[in-house]
Image (cartoon, rainbow, N blue to C red):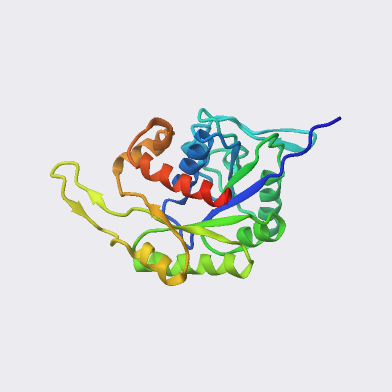
Amino acid sequence: MTAEKPVRRIVAIGSGKGGVGKSTLSANIAIALAQRGVKVGLVDADIYGPSQPLLMRAADVRATATDKKLNPVPTPYGVPMLSMGQMVDQGRAIAWRGPMVGGALGQLIDADWGDTELLILDLPPGTGDVQLSMISKHKPVGAVIVSTPQDLALIDATRAIDLFAQASVPLIGLVENMAGYICPHCGERSDPFGHGGAETAAASLGVPFLGRIPLDIAIRTASDAGTPPVAIGGPGSAAFRMIGDRIAAWLNR
């Protein structure tokens, strides 16, 4: 008697614009959930600009396939992952049209994930072909939207929220990233991108606010080194874990 195939759920991490730290959040949330005992995998759905191989210290590992199914790549953090960055040479442009991108995304999601029960899907910015293909073919159980506190980012985040709402994908909540900077020399706090904008927007839209991540150069340097803060107990790890706990609570409700 064969074992039953696990019911695999997808949580999409999206944003209306680039540069808001969505990939960093996705990596840390995946690790935080794995530390809680969740069998989680990570899909880098940013076909044109994959960054998860670097964040998860798997940039030098190529993806393989068995019986026309991709095999997820192991990472040092207990989170298997797949990304186009593990199938093309680093720095090579992926000049594909929409149908090819949708097909590639399908292969990443339909890979041989084994007993993985949850996929964290790191989406590219915007509301285009990749998002539409993912929602129609691989409907997520929920979505998390990432924004910085500034008004311009919040306008685009609102569009991303509306996309998921139109597709009847529940909103798990909104995360405010780059929220406040503490000077490492004098300890003074400043808010170069504003403060509290995402929390205010979440309240006005009736969307749960999941938390905020500080603007900290140590988060950036750890991420660039392939050591996500949650994995090493680094800066911001408590904030990432709190958000991971709230996502887990939503999934277990």
Instruction: Identify which residue, 57 or 31, lies in the foreground.
Output: 31
Q: Residue furthest left?
A: 186
Quarter of the picture containing the N terminus is top right
Total numbered labels: 0
Against 179, residue 164 (above or below) is: below
Question: Percent from the top left, x then y, of residue 233?
Answer: 37, 33
Instruction: Identify which residue, 127 or 138, lies in the foreground.
Output: 138
Question: Percent from the top left, x then y, of residue 36?
Answer: 51, 36
Q: Can see residue 228?
A: no
Instruction: Identify which residue, 64 or 117, lies in the foreground.
Output: 117
Q: Can see residue 8?
A: yes
Q: Residue furthest top?
A: 76
Against 167, residue 122 (above or below) is: above
Residue at the spot 75% in from the left edge and 38% down from the top edge: 69
Against 34, residue 16 (above or below) is: below
69 to the left or right of 200: right
Question: Percent from the top left, x then y, of residue 116?
Answer: 65, 37
Residue at the spot 58% in from the left edge and 48% down from the top edge: 252
Question: Percent from the top left, x then y, of residue 175?
Answer: 42, 56
Residue at the spot 56% in from the left edge and 64% down from the top edge: 127
Which quadrant of the figure has residue 20?
A: bottom left
Q: Residue furthest front?
A: 253
247 to the left or right of 212: right
66 to the left or right of 178: right
